[in-house]
Image (tube, grey):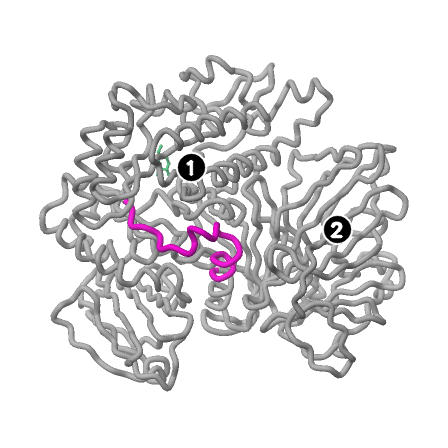
Amino acid sequence: MLEQSATSWHQKTPGASDILTTGIHQQPTQRSWLLVTENSTYALGVTEEEYVLNLYWGARLSFFSDIPAASMPPDRSSQDVSLALAPEEYPAFGGLRFGELAAKITFADQTRDADLRFHDAEIGEQDGLPALRILLQDAVYPLQVALLYQVDVANDVIIRSACFTNQGADPIVLERLFSAVWHLPRQVMPRRLTTLGGHWAGESRLQQQQVVTGTTLLESRKGVTGSHAYPWFALDTQANEQQGEVYFGTLAWSGNWALRIATTITGATAIGGGIHEHDFAWTLAAQTSFTTPDFVAGFTLDGMNGVRRRLHRYVREQVLPQKQASQPRPVLYNSWEATTFDVTEEGQCLLAERAAGLGVELFVVDDGWFPGRVHDRAGLGDWRVDPQKFPHGLRPLIERVKTLGMQFGLWVEPEMVNADSDLYRLHPDWIYHFPQRPRSEARNQLVLNVGRQDVQAYLLTVLDQLLTENAIDFIKWDMNRPLAEPGWPEYSARGGDAREIWVRHTQGIYAILDALRARHPDLSIESCSSGGGRADLGVLRRTDQVWASDNTHPDARLFIQEGISHILPGRVMGAWVTDMPHDRMVNEIPVQYRFHIAMMGALGIGGHLLHWSDEDLAEATRWIAVYKSIRHLVQDGDQYWLLSPTASKGDLAAVTSVAPDGSEAVLFAFRRSNPFWEPLPFLRLQGLQPATRYRVRELGNASASEIVLSGAALMRRGLELPLQRGSYASCLLHIRAEA
Ligand code: DGJ
């Protein structure tokens, strides 16, 4: 059942010639629905055979009469019959369907064929958003599938999921259960697919390809979102950063996932996505339900920056835990790169004193604070304080940190054990394994079976205890290896299907995070998986920021940050100034450049502050103060990428973040090399008010003069950037409307 609401935007039944407002509209005679956002329309309807078809998705349409009634397409040939051609909203394997499938189902009598037909529809509200629920019912078997469409009107985004309910007495096995299949209008003009690929220390890098007949598969089979691909796509038609038609979407799921972008020679394009079917099956017991993760997708005519603005706002307003999302993300210090496992009370206190002197607001002790953790071969699993490193527990350090005016944070990696740990010695059966196979280690770690209730209860108890006994404001939750040997012998012995672990693991992590947040409502959490390997919208429902990459080299970071900026707003993207890698950075790249790169996200410091010169410390203090004065724009403004590092092969980048009302903006610009000492062309800004006069000032440069220009001049004529002539030049401009 949907939550019902007294608001007036839903259940409208206008006539064919009435102009449609935003919201959900029902066409009473044709059994069709229009989901109208500020700039897009999504239409679906029921055919006389009771199939639910997509009727349209794209730029906003204003009249019901613009949308055809739902009807099955005629057979094209015996090879392309009607059902294979119909753009079904949720096509399940069965009958003559050969296109992109949303589900594959096996019933107790071994029938591997589903026949889902329209049963009912309901309009209401879900989690504060207008929502449409379409009920499908199998023609013969007691299986109901509820398709949920939530509409984020302002952000042109639709959030889809499917809920399977076994209404009978026999189990039903679900072998594919995607969240949705999205259909794009057939078109002659070629589309371009943009995705994000990468690996550890090189996540989220842009790739683009022309869409041709066939299927592109993006996936993770590692039990975690992964750093090799991000569950996001954009399909555009001749779009650039500033304008053009783009369809985009992302999966909110932190386990195995698949995104399939399928196009036929006739230009029909369908995008299916959800939990990966690889090694997966879910037994839906009698009278139980299973709900898929959300698949969020939208449409814009505003190019790739339009995608960014919509997803950023959606993430901030609908995904992130709202209490923390309403506060600025603090400037943090993290000890990992400075001390690695060499963590001591005294050493951390010294770093904390230096950090506080710079203006850091949150001091985080990373890996190495628990017993046996002097290297990466021992300790994971034993989440208690090492009495050798902290003879009086964490309390003295925490008190020092708080006296210095900072919050305190701690690193954990709850899903893991080292074989050399008390937990593993006590519970060797708690990890994924097959009895007759070796237990593969990666980084000397094994993965706890977080699908088990006893493991979940244990982890919740120890983490809760840690947070209750110590005044911890923030945890960094890490996850440093993929799942392997995915067996669960006890479950199999009880008749369970251990292929469920791929989902149960993620559900278990979510349950622990949810319970921790409920018990500690002021806690903030950073999601990390060897850098940016778990940065999806599923984990971000229960965490506040992500560690974008272990690679903090400014050259690499520009690419990584450009990629991730298509989905995640500045407040979510953790970015540190560090001393790593040692090769050239410290000697050759100015502190200013390194700060400007990290100031584009949630700023942190990761360098060894006891080794920084007085000059560098003073400069860091200045930039941290500047960051605090502009972070409302960086973290929560509308982001426009004006010069793409990918397009310039890493030489140039320019990004502006603008207050939603256009009254204020910041602009970061970078030029890595300039062998010909050439000036840059004028840079045209975005997002300002044409008729407003703005004062433009370079931040961090006391001798720079201010200029005053209209928004029209800044956006149409452009701005000459005050970049130094040589390599690694950067600038940071503040643009404010004159009072
Ligand atoms: C991997 C993370 O990405 C690093 O930032 C750090 O926390 C290490 N793990 C610690 O083992």
Give coordinates of residue 473: x percent, y percent: 36, 40
Picture residue at 49% right of the left edge, 29% below the top: 460
Picture residue at 85% right of the left edge, 64% below the top: 47
Give coordinates of residue 217: x percent, y percent: 60, 49
CA distance separating discs 2 and 1: 34 Å
Picture residue at 82% right of the left edge, 57% below the top: 120
From the viewer's perspective, tell me whether residue 691 is left or right of residue 150.
left
SS under mark 2: strand
The question of residue 645 being in magenta is answered with no
Going by the numbered disc 1, the residue's amino acid type is Trp
Vertical order, 582 against 691 (above or below): above
| Foreground residue among 403 and 528 | 403
Give coordinates of residue 652: x percent, y percent: 31, 64
Q: Which residue is mark 1?
A: 477
Q: Is mark 1 within 8 Å of ligand 1?
A: no
Which tag, 2 or 1, sits closer to the chain's start?
A: 2
From the viewer's perspective, tell me whether residue 211 is left or right of residue 141.
left
Q: Which residue is mark 2?
A: 146
Picture residue at 70% right of the left edge, 35% below the top: 281
Dots 2 and 1: beta carbons under 8 Å?
no
From the viewer's perspective, tell me whether residue 664 is left or right of residue 87.
left
Q: Quadrant of ligand 1?
A: top left
SS under mark 1: strand
Q: Kindly give the residue lying farthest to the front in the view shown.
A: 6
- Which dot marks residue 162? none
| Foreground residue among 430 and 223 | 430
The question of residue 320 being in magenta is answered with yes
Q: Is residue 3 visible?
A: yes
Chain part drawn in magenta = 312-332
